[in-house]
Amino acid sequence: MANLKEVRTRIESVNSTKQITSAMKMVAASKLRKSQNAIMALRPYAEKFAEILERSATGGQKSTGFAENRELDRVLIIPLSSNKGLCGVFNANVIRETINLIKEEYQNLLDEGKLDILCVGSKVEESLKFKKYPVTGNENAILDNLTYENAAALAEKLMRYFEEKKYDRIIFVYNQFKNAATQIMVHEQFLPIVSQQPADNDTASDMEIDYIFQPSREEIYNEMVPKSLKMQVYKILLDSFASEQGARMISMTQATDNATELLKELNLTYNKARQSAITNELVEIVSGADALKG
């Protein structure tokens, strides 16, 4: 059985760890509440805005601008992770999804050197660099100051890449927020704009409506595209950030619970060791008294 000093040291260590994980859980819960409110408020607006944009961009016989589907020559993949750890499998899922996407759909472009990766989050950047994937840059700083202005600046850079034909397809890989305990791993095409296919029955008739555009379709499209794409990037970043905080809160909750259980076991061990030490002392005292009498 471990001596009292060793057990006491372990109890103090676990107590200290429990305090840290409990504090991190509360911080993550606070950030989650704010980011959850933000993403839930933004998501319906962003999705409807994207639907309107898609109608104006691809409703005609010919897609132009950011809806132009070119022959794939160069592809940019943007995985979103976190700059910090202690968030369970959040980062590991992003890394795994990115690698699987490359192997399943873009392995030939990777072999030809026509695939680039722009990381958002130091964890995915470190992992992919270690695995020798073509990481050409990062936007890690945006996670430390997540605002619409910074998201808009990133969107403008990506739109410029597409306009200059530096890349023919740009894809985000991220955790989509569902609730604190559930994140959905998705890869979403950012550019070119994806045409939403109608369902076979009920929504097909809605999509076939011949809308009257005022001003013209082209004017609406040119005005709405930048706003919609900036909003889409902001929504993706908020989704990933909310998922990160949810994953961290769950992870820290489990760590705190495990520390509580471990403390119970250590206190029980400490009490047994203390009782054993007291018993041994009593035995020694009684034995010494008997020896003096003898």
Image (tube, rainbow, N blue to C red):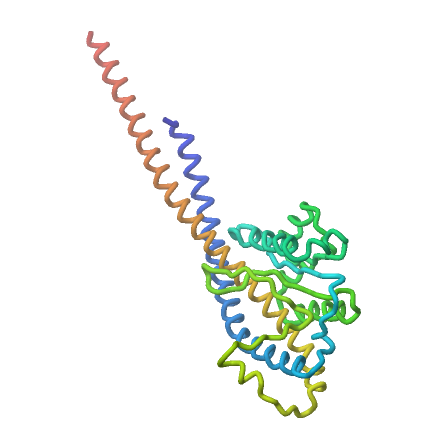
Question: Which residue is pictured at 30% across the width and 26% down the height?
Answer: 276
Expressed as whole percent of the image width and height from the top left, the position of residue 124 reads 63, 52
Question: Which residue is pictured at 66% across the width and 49% down the height?
Answer: 126
Q: Is residue 218 above or below residue 245?
A: below
Question: Which residue is pictured at 61% across the width and 90% down the height?
Answer: 211
**Residue at the extreme top:** 294
Question: Which residue is pictured at 46% across the width and 57% down the height?
Answer: 26
On the rendered structure, is 82 left or right of 217?
Answer: left
In the picture, which quadrant includes the C terminus?
top left
**Residue at the extreme left:** 293
**Residue at the extreme front:** 200
Expressed as whole percent of the image width and height from the top left, the position of residue 287 reads 24, 14
Name the one closer to the observer, 256 or 66: 66
**Residue at the extreme right:** 164
Name the one closer to the observer, 243 or 13: 243
Name the one closer to the observer, 78 or 267: 78
Quarter of the rendering containing residue 104: bottom right
Expressed as whole percent of the image width and height from the top left, the position of residue 270 reads 35, 33
**How many labels were placed on the picture?**
0
In the picture, which quadrant includes the N terminus?
top left
Expressed as whole percent of the image width and height from the top left, the position of residue 162 reads 75, 69
On the rendered structure, is 101 left or right of 14?
Answer: right
Q: Is residue 141 above or below residue 96?
A: below
On the rendered structure, is 57 left or right of 284?
Answer: right
Q: Is residue 118 above or below residue 189?
A: above
Quarter of the rendering containing residue 175: bottom right
